[in-house]
Image: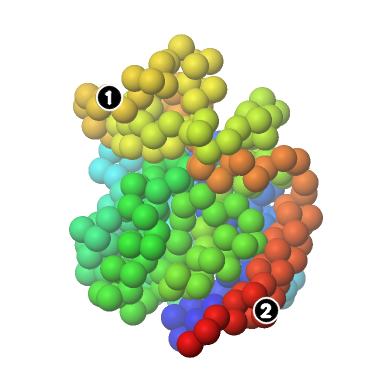
């Protein structure tokens, strides 16, 4: 990690430069707590807690479970889209509990940044292109999550090599890289190309603490990169999904690239809510998932792979002429 760009509240507790990305219906409190205890940041979408009145209690329980002086900080993901009726409520709960890491999606907000900074928290914002990144930077965020090609859920299409280097030309804050990151080699690769932290979601679907159904976990184990479909037919915003789940829901993955009418809608009455539940997101990194370990076992594996990758890069095989 590049110390000057990673805030102390993260740097002091991280075993690896890694954030467990928030996943709808997957990142429940048990997964977040396990990730933080293993030494990486765990982030949960606020929308995973229903009814919304339970959110503050669940945050308090997670904080109590992590109050050991060793665990990495936890975070909450807020959908800042205008159609999300819970935004104001969920933000208020996070502020009262002083959640250390807030990840916003679909709309950077200087007011959210101001309120989170008031108690010493940090704000990261998901971006898929430079236009979105510039808006987030202007809002004063502490870091941007560059959601690149191959990322699960609402992902972009840019190459991480291109996007990270363009970002670094305009932003001297923290860059977190998302997109098909699935093991310790990938984590080191993200930092080698200029990111400060890596962002990983799909590999944690197939873990013991994940809230994913057994069928969802097995579908991840059975999948490879070619089984991921990029489509906006699920939520109105393009994202990556498991083709097998689309087929099971009666959708044709071959027709998936066709644009959906009406745009995004995150309201409680959204008719697409069933699709959110039944069509499962995942990124192109699923091909490395072949077992269902505990989070602690998986992060230990990542740490060993990270060290192995470091040794390989400094070994004799990389001593070229000139």
Residues tagged 1 and 2 counted as in contact (Cβ below 8 A): no
Residue 220 appears left or right of 112? right
Q: Which residue is mark 2?
A: 315
Which mark, residue 102? none
Secondary structure under tag 2 reads loop
Please state the horizontal and vertical placement of residue 49, each as a whole percent of the image: 54, 41
Number of numbered discs visible in the structure rendering = 2
Residue 127: image location, x then y, percent:
33, 56
| Nearer the observer, 26 or 160 | 160
Q: Say left or right for 200 vs 217.
A: left
Give the quadrant of the N terminus: bottom right
Taking the spot 73% from the left edge, 54% from the top edge, the residue there is 298
Expressed as whole percent of the image width and height from the top left, the position of residue 53 reads 50, 42
Reply above or below: 248 against 150: above
Q: Quadrant of residue 116?
A: bottom left
Q: Residue furthest top?
A: 250
Callout 1 environment at 10 Å: few (<14), some (14 to 19), or many (20+)? few
Displayed quadrant of residue 309: bottom right
The front one of 238 and 149 is 149
Q: Which residue is mark 1?
A: 258
Disc with the residue nearer the chain's start (1 vs 2):
1
Q: Residue furthest front?
A: 321
Q: Secondary structure at mark 1?
A: loop
User: Badge 2, how many Cα within 10 Å: few under 14, some, many 20+?
Assistant: few
Q: Position of residue 160 (x, y in %)?
A: 40, 59
Q: Is residue 139 visible?
A: no
The residue mark sitting in front, 1 or 2, is 2
Look at 27% across and 56% down and name the residue there: 129
Rendering quarter of residue 108: bottom left
Q: Which one is nearer the viewer's eye here, 69 or 300?
A: 300
Q: CA distance from mark 1 to mark 2?
A: 48 Å
Q: Is residue 317 above or below residue 211?
A: below
């Amino acid at each position: 990690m590049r110390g000057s760009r990673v805030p102390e509240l993260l740097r002091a507790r991280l075993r690896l430069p890694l954030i467990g990305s928030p996943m709808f219906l997957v990142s429940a409190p048990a997964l977040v707590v396990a990730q933080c205890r293993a030494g990486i940041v765990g982030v949960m979408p606020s929308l995973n807690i229903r009814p919304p009145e339970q959110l503050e209690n669940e945050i308090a329980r997670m904080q109590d479970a992590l109050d050991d002086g060793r665990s990495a900080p936890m975070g909450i993901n807020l959908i800042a889209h205008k159609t999300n009726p819970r935004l104001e409520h969920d933000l208020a709960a996070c502020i009262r509990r002083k959640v250390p890491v807030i990840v916003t999606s679909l709309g950077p907000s200087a007011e959210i940044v101001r309120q989170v900074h008031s108690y010493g928290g940090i704000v990261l914002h998901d971006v898929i292109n430079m236009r979105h990144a510039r808006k987030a930077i202007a809002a004063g965020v502490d870091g941007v999550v560059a959601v690149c090609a191959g990322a699960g859920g609402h992902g972009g299409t840019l190459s991480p090599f291109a996007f990270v280097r363009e970002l670094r030309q305009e932003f001297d804050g923290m860059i977190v890289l998302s997109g098909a990151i699935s093991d310790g080699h990938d984590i080191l690769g993200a930092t080698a190309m200029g990111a400060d932290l890596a962002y990983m979601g799909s590999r944690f679907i197939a873990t013991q603490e994940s809230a994913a159904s057994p069928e969802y976990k097995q579908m991840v184990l059975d999948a490879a990169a070619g089984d991921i479909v990029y489509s906006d037919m699920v939520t109105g915003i393009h994202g990556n999904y498991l083709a097998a789940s689309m087929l099971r829901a009666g959708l044709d993955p071959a027709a998936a690239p066709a644009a959906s009418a009406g745009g995004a809608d995150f309201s409680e009455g959204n008719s697409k809510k069933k699709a959110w539940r039944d069509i499962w997101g995942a990124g192109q990194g699923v091909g490395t998932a072949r077992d269902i370990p505990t989070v602690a076992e998986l992060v230990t594996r990542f740490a060993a792979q990270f060290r192995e990758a470091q040794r390989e890069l400094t070994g004799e095989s990389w001593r070229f002429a000139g």
